[in-house]
Structure formats: structure tokens, C-alpha cells
Amino acid sequence: MNPSFLNPLQSLRPAPVLLPLLSRAQMSSSSRIPSPPDNGVVLGCGAVSVDFLATVAAFPKPDDKIRSVSLKVEGGGNTGNALTCAARLGLKPRVISKVADDTQGKSMLEELEADGVDTSFMVVGKEGNSPFTYVIVDNQTKTRTCIHTPGNPPMVPEELTHANLSSALDGAKLVYFDGRLWETALVVAQEANRRKISMLIDAERPREGLDDLLNLATYVVCSEKFPQTWTNAPSTPSALISMLLRLPNLKFVIVTLGEKGCIMFERSTDEASGQEEVEVESLLESLKTSIDESSLLPVCISSKSSLRISANGIGAVSGRLLLGKAEVIPPSELVDTTGAGDAFIGAVLYAICAGMSPEKMLPFASQVAAAGCRALGARSGLPKRTDPRLAPYWL
């Protein structure tokens, strides 16, 4: 190993969140759970829908006829799921989206409101249909296949009045976009930017208008394939460097890797002269060798801060790299991965509002996402802040 590369390794450190879980009796004491953040208002703009979830013994082959093992109907959509998660953790979410004045639309609004999401800024169309999704969950692989039917007619910016937009943003600490309803989302983002409100973008895949949203983003959470697809970089770590160079307003970018955990690049607020420079691929490999793979609970490890981290042929950014290990879910407990990414984002929204350090935020978000994977559907397994599994993160 190159001796000049040793310094970054000397500061690798696991996140201090692996504390013993408290019993339910201990958790009954309100003193164990801190109050939610004082400014916990988040606004989300994007997809809400109804999910029709059917579990099957194995995914069917073409022209097969099979029977479902179980069936559940519940709310879905990236924004609906992420805000539901944030509400259960203690935030005060508001949502901008559109449903029709039909049975499905009414059930969506009722479900969101029951979880504490403010739906007063939703548009309810007099005609058409509300969005819905068929979700087929494979009982063998625990994977899911989604068939989405968009709402019709689609939402247009003119349906969001200036008064409603202004009220929705009043007092908001953070605005979240999932990349849907992009024309309306861009109107919301531009006003949020004018008010200097931070924004988090879910970059699941390239979509129309997404680049305009990313240019205004403060934080980005990406799917595994997005960074390389968007930047054409040769690897995920180098793609993160490219994203931060192309989007100078970003404070951090996270790429989620499913059961493999996540990678985060946090930009440094200062660039001191003579900063040590390391190559991102080598730095990531060092993080992988230093993380505790024996832990069943999520853990996080980071490089030291204020490094100059480079990618060959792309450039360099000052900051630090963090690697999060996902919770290991026993096969007997893994039910459905639908909405796991939305749960992760909902927890990140909470962590930002609560001022959590990245070392605590990544394991916290992983823990919340893993809880959601233990039940059928995107919302059934989402934990509330009183859940004993979250106790270590409140200390």
C-alpha cells in the first residue's frame, strides 16, 4: 500500500449507534424518547397511489395462470410512502400531488391523513382516475414487480394556486421531490429556492425535468444504477465525484445499494490549502476492509474529514466518504422489499431535520428501511418513533 494513503485510514470510525436495544417496558418511559424536531415541517411533491399487492409462490412464466398466496390493498407512491415514514418518525409532512374524486383517491387521502400527513394542498380532480399500481411479490426471491397506471388527467402547474404553494412552503424546513409531476415540481422547487429552503431529490432513474430539479438540489439520494447512468462515469464512486462537480449546490449525495448498504459523499464546507488527496476507488476499498461485517445491525464507517478526493479523468472534491452496511434480515423475517428506498428517504428527511450526524443517519435510515421489509407493502412495516428497534438512535 502506498504510504501516503495511510492517513485516511487512521481516522476510519464506526458510527456510535450500536447500543443494546431497550425492552418495550423501558421504552414506555417518555424520557427515553426525545421530542421531535422543533422545525419538523417537510413538504413533499410527487407520486401518491394505491398499491394492489399480490404475493405469489413464484413469479409466473408467460401465459401462466397462477393464484395469489395473499393480497393487500394500501397506499403507495414514492412521495406518499416517504412522507408516511417521516410522519411516523415525528415530522409534520405536507404533500402536493393529485388524485381523482373516486374511491381510490378518497382512500389515499384518508390513509395519509390517518398517519399525520397534511393533504390540504392536494388537488382532487372531478374526472378521470387516481393512480394505482399492481405489485406482484415473489415469495421465493422476495422481489417485486410493479405495473403502474398513472392518474388521469395528469397534474399541471396551473392546478396549484399561488396561494396554496405559498401556504405549503410557509414554515417548511425541507422540500422533497421524487421526480414525478416534474412541471409542477419545478414550480415548487423554484419557489423553495427563492425562499432558500433546502431540497432533497430522489434520483431513482432519469426522468423528464429531473436535471432541472437536480440543479436546485441540496441533497440527493440515488438508486444504485443512477449515478453511472447520469454521468457516464466508469464506476459508482467516480460517478459520485462527477455529480458533486456538476451540482455545486449539493451538500451530500447518497447511493443506496439494497442489501449491500449505501455509499455517501459529504462535501466539505472548507477547502484548506495543502489538503491531502486520495483516489476515491482506493478509499472506498479501504472502507470496505475496515467495516465490521460480523454485525447483524447496520453500521457506518467514514474516512477522515477534509480530504481532497479525486477520480481519474473526472476531477476532485473536498469532503469525506462514508460507507453504510445494511441490516442483515434473516430469510424467515424478510417479507417484501416494496418501498424500502422510500422508507430510507423518509428516515433521511427526519435525520436532516433532527440534525443527526451522517454516522448516525445512515444506520438509522437502514434500520427503518429494514423494518419496512418485514411486512407486505410499502407502509405496513414502517416503524413509529416509539418502536424499540429505534431506541439506540434516540440516545
Image (cartoon, grey):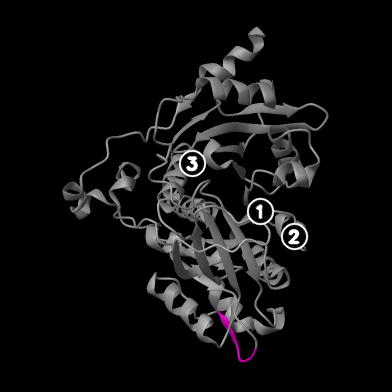
Whole-percent x, y for residue 17 in the image: 37, 36
Discs 1, 2 touching: Cβ within 8 Å:
yes
Circle 2: residue type: Arg
Q: Is residue 126 magenta?
A: yes
Q: Residue at x 58, y 61 (%)?
A: 176
Residue 240 in view here: yes
Q: Residues in magenta?
A: 122-127
Element assignment for label 2:
loop
- What is the C-alpha distance between the residues marked 3 and 1? 18 Å
Residue 79 versus residue 352 in the image, above or below: below
Residue corresponding to mark 1: 204
Residue 196 in view here: no
Residue corresponding to mark 3: 362
Q: Does the magenta stretch include residue 308?
A: no
| Circle 1 Cα neighbour tier, 10 Å, few/some/many (<14 / 14–19 / ≥20) | many
- What is the C-alpha distance between the residues marked 1 and 2? 9 Å
